[in-house]
Image (cartoon, grey):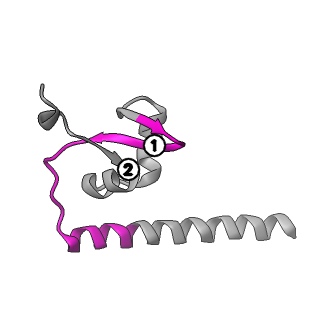
Amino acid sequence: MSMMEEGKWMSLVEYALENNTSLSTLRRRIKSGKVRYQKIRGKYFVMGSHTSDLTLKDKITLLERQISDQETLIQILEEQLRKKSL
């Protein structure tokens, strides 16, 4: 298999955007060995493919969903902190 067929090394954000997955899911896949990765100077890179071609609108939609997920997580953690401090 040639390098072109195999893919390219991508940052986690690039891979998540192109594969419509969250960063937390991608990190779990790395930890479980389901995704080929390498670590360079403390930064993770995963093997991606050239088959994805998301439009800018799709990327924005994905990022908006990820922001919403993060906001929900923040609310949950803030509520846990509030309950803990009572």
Magenta extent: 38-65
56 part of magenta stretch: yes
Mark identifier at residue 81:
none
Classify residue 6 by image quadrant. Answer: top left
**Between disc 1 and disc 2, whose residue precedes?**
2
Towards the viewer: 16 or 41: 41
Q: Position of residue 81 (x, y in %)?
A: 76, 66
Confirm whether the magenta stretch covers residue 46. yes
Residue 70 percent coordinates (x, y): 51, 66
Label 1: which secondary element: strand
Rendered image: mark on residue 11: 2
Q: Are marks 1 and 2 in contact (CB under 8 Å)?
A: yes
Indicate the quadrant where residue 38 lies: top left
Q: Secondary structure at mark 2?
A: strand
Q: Quadrant of the N terminus?
A: top left
Residue 4 place in picture, x, y as percent: 13, 37
Q: CA distance from mark 1 to mark 2?
A: 7 Å
Q: For the C terminus, which image quadrant?
A: bottom right
49 relative position to 10: left or right? left
Residue at x 49% of width, y 34% of height: 31
Relative to 80, does residue 26 appear above or below in the rendering? above
User: In this figure, what is the number of numbered marks?
Assistant: 2
Task: Name the image quarter holding residue 58.
Answer: bottom left
Q: Position of residue 14 (x, y in %)?
A: 32, 55
Above/below status of 75 relative to 8: below
Q: Which residue is mark 1?
A: 44
